Image: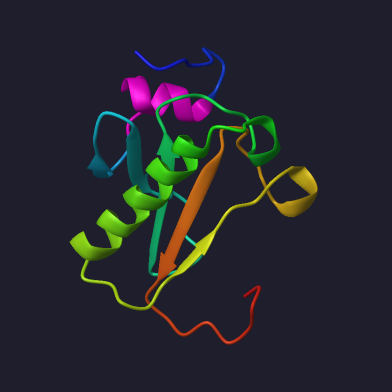
Amino acid sequence: MPSSDPNCLFCKIIKGDIPSTVVYEDAKVFAFNDIHPDAPTHVLIISKTHTASHLETDDVQLYADIMQGAKIVAKQLGLSDYRLVMNNGAGAGQSVFHMHLHLLAGHPFTSPAG
């Protein structure tokens, strides 16, 4: 079983202690709909291994697993146009300190950040 943090919201979601709408899951990745979506499609893709943020890991395979999960989710949802976002730190908008990727789609994105 991958490492987890008993106080982490996303670790609790992975374990099923907190309900979520699962979009995709495999042995390494868990993807679910964001409960406060910023776009018509807003899926969070997370590693099943707890890592607080982008700066706290050098595990290249973890990044590959998350990116592959995003690709699978996009294909599964029939998406060809979407945005992938990873926030690092509270000042950048990270509110849950379990490294994760946002997959956003469903409307045109007119600027690099919005």
Nearest the viewer among 87 and 20 is 87
* Image location (x, y in percent) of residue 18: 38, 26
Whether residue 79 sits left or right of residue 7 in the image: it is left
The secondary structure that dominates the magenta segment is helix
Residue 52, quarter of picture: top right
What's the coloring here?
Answer: rainbow
Whether residue 53 sits left or right of residue 109 in the image: it is right
Nearest the viewer among 62 and 24 is 62
Q: Magenta includes 21?
A: no
Whether residue 91 sits left or right of residue 26 in the image: it is right
Q: Residue furthest right?
A: 91
* Quadrant for the N terminus in the image: top left
* Image location (x, y in percent) of residue 40: 38, 69
* Image location (x, y in percent) of residue 33: 36, 50
* Quadrant for the C terminus in the image: bottom right
- The residue that appears at 37% across and 78% down in the rendered structure is 81
Q: Magenta includes 15?
A: yes
Residue 61, quarter of picture: top left
- Bounds of the magenta span? 9-19
The correct choice, above or below, for 24 with respect to 98 in the image is: below
- The residue that appears at 75% across and 43% down in the rendered structure is 90
The correct choice, above or below, for 91 with respect to 15 in the image is: below
Nearest the viewer among 94 and 36 is 94
- The residue that appears at 70% across and 51% down in the rendered structure is 93
Q: How many marks?
A: 0
The correct choice, above or below, for 79 with respect to 46 in the image is: below
